[in-house]
Image (tube, grey):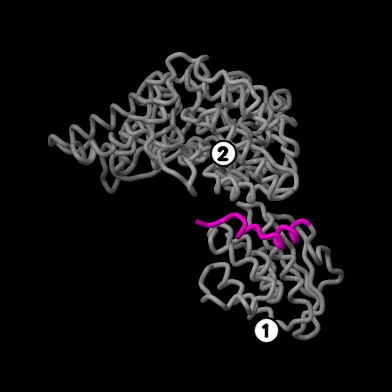
Amino acid sequence: MSTAAKLPRTVRETMPGYDLEKVRADFPILRQKAHGHPIIYLDNAATSQKPKAVIDAIVRYYEQDNANIHRGVHYLSERATRDFEDARKAVQLFLHAARPSEIIFVRSATEAINLVAQTYGRVHVGAGDEVLITAMEHHSNIVPWQILCDEKGARLQVAPINERGELILEVFERLLNPRTRIVAVAHVSNALGTVNPIAAIAKLAHARNIPVIVDGAQAVPHMPVDVQELDCDFYVFSGHKAYGPTGIGALYGKLALLEAMPPYQGGGDMISSVTFAKTIYNKLPHKFEAGTPDMSGAVGMHAAIDYLNGLGMENVAAHEHELLAYGTQALSTLRGVRIIGTAKEKAGVLSFVIEGVHPHDIGTILDQEGIAIRTGHHCAQPVMEIFGVDATARASFGLYNTKEEIDALVRGIEKVQEVFA
Amino acid sequence: MPELRDLYQELILEHSRAPRNYRELKPADHQAEGYNPLCGDRFTVYLHMDGDVIRDISFQGSGCAISKASASMMTQMLKGKTRRDAEELFGRFHSVVTGQSANGSQADLGKLAVFSGVSEFPTRVKCATLAWHTLQAALEGKQEAVSTE
């Protein structure tokens, strides 16, 4: 008998209104089998699966509304423009931003960070200045700042984390100094699951007039986010991790900051007039959206936001928190298994290592059981170094996962240990 | 459907637990590093050459069972062999793990035939071949780390 089978089950009754079976039925991909087993998808931190509503919305857009936006006078162009701007409003409301013009569509969270580094960053960071990040950042919130610092002769400072994978706030505060120009921090760590105290971080930074950019890629799909309450200056996320399509993401920025920033890329749609002598840039948000954007992606992201709102982000967060607690308890009882990242405030990520077994072998054996996890460094090599491992196995939960799937994960880990006994 | 035991054959598991020639070679006249950062596999292969003959060969590092066993068995097979023998064996090994060899050619591989199951697991080919590419780099005197990712 597996260890997890002995654990208490309190699954659905604790959350009336969250009908897990119905939720699962919304995701066509989960009906498949992998290697003869029902697919157990625990790689949500890499990308999420898409509900039928998102897939349908994209099909509907192409079947009924497709045209280029913001420039046609015709029927379809008006419809496509309305779809695109409706999606912007949906993102605005989802993030609780004050205005739709504070939402810029981008390809991904990565592109959004690069946008801020290459516009705000290039104006405000000079030789001898500092950009402060944390030791738990994804490569996408490290490398854009390294590129900027290299170009400007500035220094990248890294606030350390403790053995549980939590930011050490006192040291973070000490690293803020008159040369600090930007603070860039993850809302939730993709490799550890740690939830950072963004409001507290923003307060410390703002006391010194330093703006804060938050990488929300791992937060937006899993918890309610209110950018005004957090009082961050920029907030970024990707559609595909939040049950939307790939190729679309959003940047939130406070209006005054966005208005003062130079454009990111030049092209169509981001201008109001062009002559060879001078170009006048378009107003927000279009100033930052050069070229034909990903309209169908925005429509898909809108559908994903509607889907999440329908479930209620509080419910999604509560469900995943329960999965995390259940999974943490189950894995803690397994001999030879060490959980990497044990922060008090954590989202649904279980990074772990098994004594004597490389994560890659764990991944292959679990895959044969139909269980999809991520193995490797999770684009967070500095985190691996801090915990003294080359790689971890990572199970990350989504709104459709079940306790039964975690039981299967536990049985899979036991199988790994049998193979390598 | 691929079977796990085709991949994790007993000989492979045994070599990954107790790798042979697992030490630094001092002095090594050839050495190179192989690094697959996505997986976290990292090995150094050391060679002591006598003209074209591999007088001694060893390795060190960390990685998954497949990469470690492959490195271990490679060092076992190549001691005393010529550079040309090594290149030919790598060619045959590569064909087998990538599923490009005709049936029966596994016979030429000796013990390395236990890696034939790798061909059913395409994501693991890079693990099985890392040590071999590292060996090649060492023979060619490459300075930068090689990767099979």
Q: Which residue is mark 1?
A: B84
- Nearer to the camera, A251 or B88: B88
In the image, which residues are magenta?
A: B1-17
The image quarter containing residue A382 is: top right
**Residue at the extreme front:** A1
Specify few, some or many for label 1: CA neighbours under 10 Å numbering under 14, 14-19, or 20 or more.
few
Main secondary structure found in the magenta portion: helix
Instruction: Say which quadrant the C terminus of chain B sits in.
Output: bottom right
Marks 2/1 in contact by CB < 8 Å: the verdict is: no
Q: CA distance from mark 2 to mark 1?
A: 47 Å
Q: Is residue A50 above or below residue A232?
A: below
Picture coordinates of residue A92 (x, y %)? 38, 23
- Please indicate, yes or no, whether residue A271 appears anywhere in the rendered image: no
Q: At label 2, which amino acid type do we have?
A: Asn
Picture coordinates of residue B108 (x, y %)? 63, 79
**Residue at 57% across / 44% down in the picture?**
A374
* Chain ID at mark 1: B
* Chain ID at mark 2: A
Mark number for residue A141?
A: 2
**Residue at 80% across / 65% down in the picture?**
B20
Q: Is residue A7 above or below residue B50?
A: above
Under circle 2, the secondary element is helix
Picture coordinates of residue A86 (x, y %)? 28, 26
**Residue at the extreme right:** B26
